[in-house]
């Protein structure tokens, strides 16, 4: 990381600026062109969960989704970093049941549900949390369904050398204009994560959006891959609660507020991507990537919402339900409003 990255958000306590969050904003089109960068577009970052929709593409292109008649709701949870609510665990379990597997086949590891109510209910009932509660269980279920459909070994489906992961790497390289081999590490769920430039994440996001164009001549990806991307994008838009949770999750609430204009995906260490679907303003779609240098989420949502406002994807009315993310309030121990987090950059997008 660089000490020269611009400030994206500041934390104020009354008139006093207490902290700053530095980072990068990158905007690209589906042809791979850099439209705008605020900070270093070639900054390398770990993909983490931002690429889950891309990791889910082989689930469709392999024929597994059709063979096992996966629903849009199931396709959505394959792209999720979910809260571990019943809607998530039951959906992931149903995917595994399609191929006669259960929770024990997962290799993502178990952690307590992010959703507090679900975690408290498990404790009251004296039940353990399982791998299905892992926020990545849908992604892993999708990988297992694909492996079974292809007749592959499932014990090491998460290994970077496994055919499932090799297909994911090739797909990511295709969408992001990347050269293999990619710098590879182990994600929190034990699946691979990759070191890529923020520019590549934005291009990949743009191509996911571009696949939804109603004019085939404007679509960048090959027909089969574009069709798979379109299905996943539509599933995420139709079931945003499957991507994050029923309440209090920025991805979910942003997609709800945008009403079909975009899909969004957070990754650990405050990396983020947005795919803006083709529209009058951006007829071929647009991709955005974000990275907060310190890995903190505190300045991330204000930065994302402010960017979408400045480039004209969201309007003031659409940001109203996002106000707790856009302008987070700082309260003291007595519940008094004593400060806020605010994005402070000017992209000058309309003045280019």
Image (spheres, rainbow, N blue to C red):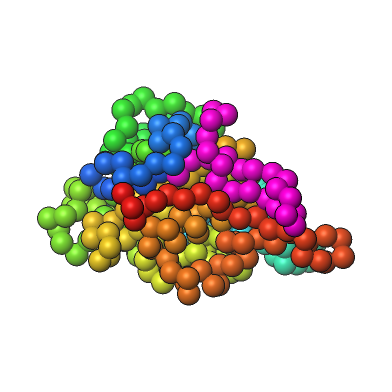
Could you say which quadrant of the image residue 20 lies in? top right
Residue 306 pos. (x, y %)? 49, 57
Q: Is residue 22 magenta?
A: yes
The correct choice, above or below, for 239 with respect to 23 in the image is: below
Residue farthest to the left, as pictured: 217
Residue at 46% in and 50% down: 346
The correct choice, above or below, for 346 with respect to 329 in the image is: above
Residue at 77% in and 61% down: 338
Residue at 43% in and 69% down: 315
Residue farthest to the bottom, as pictured: 317
Viewer-side residue, 23 vs 123 = 23
Viewer-side residue, 254 vs 76 = 254
Could you say which quadrant of the image residue 126 lies in? bottom right
Residue 36 seen in render: yes
Residue at 63% in and 65% down: 324
Residue 13 pos. (x, y %)? 75, 54
Residue 211 pos. (x, y %)? 25, 56
Residue 157 seen in render: no
Magenta stretch bounds: 1-25
């Amino acid at each position: 990381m660089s000490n020269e990255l611009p400030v994206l958000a500041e934390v104020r306590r009354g008139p006093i600026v207490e902290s700053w969050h530095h980072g990068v904003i990158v905007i690209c089109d589906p042809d791979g062109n850099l439209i705008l960068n605020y900070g270093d577009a070639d900054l390398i970052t770990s993909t983490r969960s931002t690429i889950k929709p891309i990791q889910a593409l082989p689930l469709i292109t392999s024929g597994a989704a059709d063979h096992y008649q996966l629903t849009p709701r199931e396709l959505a949870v394959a792209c999720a970093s979910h809260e571990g609510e019943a809607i998530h665990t039951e959906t992931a379990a149903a995917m595994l049941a399609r191929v006669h597997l259960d929770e024990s086949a997962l290799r993502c590891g178990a952690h307590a549900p992010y959703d507090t109510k679900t975690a408290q209910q498990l404790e009251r009932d004296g039940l353990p949390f399982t791998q299905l509660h892992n926020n990545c269980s849908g992604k892993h279920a999708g990988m297992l369904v694909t492996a079974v459909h292809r007749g592959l070994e499932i014990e090491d489906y998460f290994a970077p050398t496994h055919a499932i992961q090799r297909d994911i790497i090739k797909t990511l390289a295709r969408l992001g204009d990347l050269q293999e081999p990619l710098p590879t590490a182990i994600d929190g769920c034990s699946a691979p994560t990759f070191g890529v430039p923020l520019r590549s994440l934005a291009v990949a996001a743009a191509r996911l959006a571009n696949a939804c164009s109603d004019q085939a001549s404007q679509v960048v990806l090959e027909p089969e891959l574009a069709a798979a991307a379109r299905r996943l994008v539509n599933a995420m838009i139709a079931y945003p609660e499957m991507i994050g949770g029923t309440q209090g999750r920025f991805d979910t609430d942003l997609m709800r507020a945008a009403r079909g204009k975009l899909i969004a995906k957070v990754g650990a260490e405050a990396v983020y991507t947005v795919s803006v679907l083709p529209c009058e303003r951006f007829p071929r779609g647009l991709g955005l990537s974000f990275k907060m240098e310190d890995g903190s989420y505190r300045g991330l949502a204000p930065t994302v919402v402010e960017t979408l406002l400045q480039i004209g994807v969201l309007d003031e009315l659409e940001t109203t339900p996002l106000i707790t993310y856009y302008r987070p309030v700082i309260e003291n121990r007595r519940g008094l409003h004593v400060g806020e987090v605010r994005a402070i950059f000017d992209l000058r997008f309309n003045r280019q």
